[in-house]
């Protein structure tokens, strides 16, 4: 199964991921950056399972993230 990888340090708080998929990302009220819900942190990157019904949506989000902080692996 594929995973979402998210390097939060690269986030610039544009919010495009949160707008498109609020069931996957939410804005952190402390710093305005996105948080990957149910993500597991390993080093500087968060990981979360990517369910088959989410793949097209997350591919779109990957393509619009201005810092390339989000990837599918």
Image (tube, grey):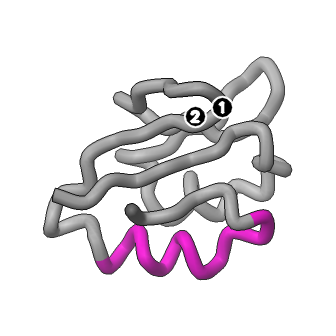
Label 2: few (<14), some or many (≥20) within 10 Å? some
Give the residue at mark 2.
Answer: 35
Count up the numbered dots: 2
Residue 38, horizontal then vertical, whole percent? 35, 29
Q: Position of residue 45 (x, y in %)?
A: 58, 37
Q: Which residues are magenta?
A: 56-67
Give the image quarter of residue 30: top right
For the point 64% across and 40% down, the residue is: 34
**Of the numbered discs in the image, which one, if any, rests on residue 56?**
none
Tell me if residue 62 is in the magenta stretch: yes
Look at 65% across and 77% down and name the residue there: 64
Q: Quadrant of the N terminus?
A: bottom left
Q: Nearer the viewer, residue 70 or 56?
A: 70
CA–CA distance in space, label 1 to label 2: 13 Å
Between tags 1 and 2, which lies in front? 1
Q: Residue at x 40, y 46 (%)?
A: 24
Q: Is residue 52 magenta?
A: no
Mark 2 element type = strand
Toward which corner of the image does residue 59 lie, by quadrant?
A: bottom left
Question: Residue 4 location in percent, x, y?
Answer: 40, 53
From this view, report whether residue 70 is shown above or below residue 39.
below
Q: Crowding at label 1, few (<14), some or many (≥20) Cα neighbours within 10 Å?
A: few
Asked if labels 2 and 1 touch by Cβ distance under 8 angstroms, the answer is no
Q: Which mark is residue 44?
A: 1
Q: Is residue 72 above or below residue 40?
A: below
Q: Main secondary structure of the magenta part?
A: helix
Left or right: residue 46 versus residue 43 is left
Image-based side of 22 in relation to 70, left or right: left
Quarter of the image that includes the C terminus = bottom left
x then y, percent, for residue 61: 53, 71
Comparing 53 with 69, the one in front is: 69
């Amino acid at each position: 199964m594929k995973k979402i990888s998210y390097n939060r340090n690269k986030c610039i708080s544009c919010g495009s991921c949160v707008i498109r998929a609020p069931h996957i990302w939410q804005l952190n009220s402390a710093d305005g950056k996105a948080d990957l819900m149910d993500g597991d942190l390993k080093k500087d990157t968060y990981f979360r399972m990517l369910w088959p019904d989410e793949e097209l949506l997350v591919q779109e989000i990957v393509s619009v993230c201005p810092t390339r902080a989000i990837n599918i692996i």
